[in-house]
Amino acid sequence: MVKTRFAPSPTGHLHIGGARTALFNYLFSKHNNGIFVLRIEDTDLERSKDEYTQDILEGLKWLGIFWDEGPFFQRERMDLYRAHAIRLLENGLAYRCYCTPEELEEKRKAAIKEGKKVAYDRTCRDLKEQKPKKPYAIRFKTPKSGQVTFNDIIRGQITFNCEELDDLIILRSDGTPTYNFTVVVDDALMGITHIIRGDDHINNTPRQILIYEALGYKVPEFAHVPLIHGKDKTRLSKRHGATSLLEYRNEGFLPEALLNYLARLGWAYGDQEIFSKEELIEKFDINHVGKSPAIFDMDKLKWLNSHYIKTSQDSRIADLLEAFLLKAGVKIDNREKLIPIVKNLKDRAKTLKEMAQMAEFFFNDDVHYEEKAKEKYLTYETKKILEDFLDGFVSLKENDEAGQKLLIENIVKETGKKTVDVVQPIRVALSGKTASPGIFEVINILGKKSVEKRIKKAIESIC
RNA sequence: GGUCCCAUCGUCUAGUGGACUAGGACGUCGGCCUCUCACGCCGAAAACACGAGUUCGAACCUCGUUGGGACCA
């Protein structure tokens, strides 16, 4: 039975890279009818915050990445780690280290001075006598020679020389366990079969394998996925803008767009670009994940988002849009308008936030004119067009699109202007913008009264 | 600095020794559609980091160089 896990530290928001790692774990386990575990690595009491744990859980749920087991919290498992450390101690596979932080710091400095490798010098490894009263850390006895080799699912065979590894602390003198130790104990105890994680952990892997072996646990399979980079090709970080997953929700992205984008970042299935979650589960193959880091491309994400906006049900987009309008301080006078607005804006907006900006004018008859729009289209010259339009519009017998079309055609004929020159002033009068949905759509969504009000206001604004 | 990893259009990638005149997608540019903006449709420019070797044949295998990244310090 395949079992994978996502094990974030709640020391920050769930970011794009973490979300992708979670996704790969999720997809791999689901593809193999396996189990996906969520574990919160909150041993760093100082930096871990419940707020971040909530952010992570919420982010995963939003994306539709659901876990089968957990969330487990490492904070609640401290006894387990201590017991394992003591077991290694008793088996002679670990030892007490009495060196103080000050001593270690001095050794480190000396090593740097001499140009030597900075590693623990193993002073306490073979102590004849223990020092019962002194505080101690527990260190793992790393073999002094030999090699550790593992077969990474994505990278292939990777080998490390043991000489490069020093005797790492597994339990600090204050009794708290260290990262490399807790992961191994947990992954082993939870029966994780495949560890899929960022390739920033490659260097930790040989130490962890040695610990598995010392503990007598089966070593799992490893798959190290490349990190996501920003435009400058360094690891994605705050400098690159929005990295927190939920920020994308607030910016008006749909979860399926993000899911699709993240999955396709570093992985491909022939020429296919669009994948539903179910399709991803069916087609995802960890062996085909690329080895080189991928750069996060906002444009492509936006394209996917617009695709999903276009293909979503109007009612769903309307509900989401409502929240964005409310957030923008728009008073929604008439909810009925929402659906036709969505129909018209679906093809135009790349994000829901954008859509809200485009939709705003529908809800306020006191139109705000964009400066350039007013300057160009609400002029003395166009005043007559607006007046003609208003006259005609008020007296329209059949106020439907056909009638409105005829009205505009007549104005075009009478004035001898081009259609665009007639329509644009009307558009600006109604929307305040030079770009909007089709003029007849706008007219009919607004309704008769609103249109009249807005045209009058525009005429008055021209002095 | 040490260790490890990586390298196909600007970006995500297809490619697993002959099907490669290197395919798709985003973006860019041009055109069509058109009341504006989008959407849609059509088209274009755009890449195998470099150098050796293996082979009848290399984007693909090997080695080196260069460049980039991650971790540790």
Image (spheres, grey):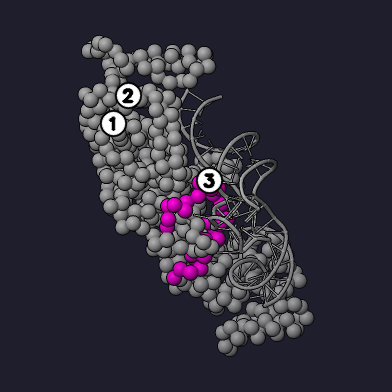
Label 3 element class: loop
Q: Picture quarter containing residue A444?
A: bottom right
Of A89 and A61, the residue lying toward us: A89
Q: Amino acid at mark 1?
A: Ala
**Circle 3 is placed at which residue position?**
A292
Quadrant the C terminus of chain A occupies: bottom right
**Circle 2 is placed at which residue position?**
A141
Q: Amino acid at mark 2?
A: Lys
Q: Above or below — where is A26 with respect to A106?
A: below
Q: Above or below — where is A195 with respect to A449?
A: above
- Residue A143 appearing in the image: yes
Q: Picture quarter containing residue A9?
A: top left
Across and down, in percent, residue A64 comes to: 37, 57
Region rendered in magenta: A284-313
The answer to whether residue B5 is left or right of residue A49 is right
Q: Say yes or no: labels 1 and 3 on the same chain.
A: yes
Q: Above or below — where is A312 with respect to A403?
A: above
Label 2 close to label 1 by CB (< 8 Å) = yes
Of A312 and B7, the residue lying toward us: B7
Label 1 close to label 3 by CB (< 8 Å) = no
Label 1 element class: helix
Q: Please, which chain is the residue tagged with disc 2 on? A: A
The answer to whether residue A396 is left or right of residue A382 is left
Residue drawn at point x = 36 percent, y = 44 percent: A221
Cα gap from disc 1 to disc 3, whole angstroms: 33 Å
Mark 3 and mark 2 lie on one chain; the one further toward the N terminus is 2
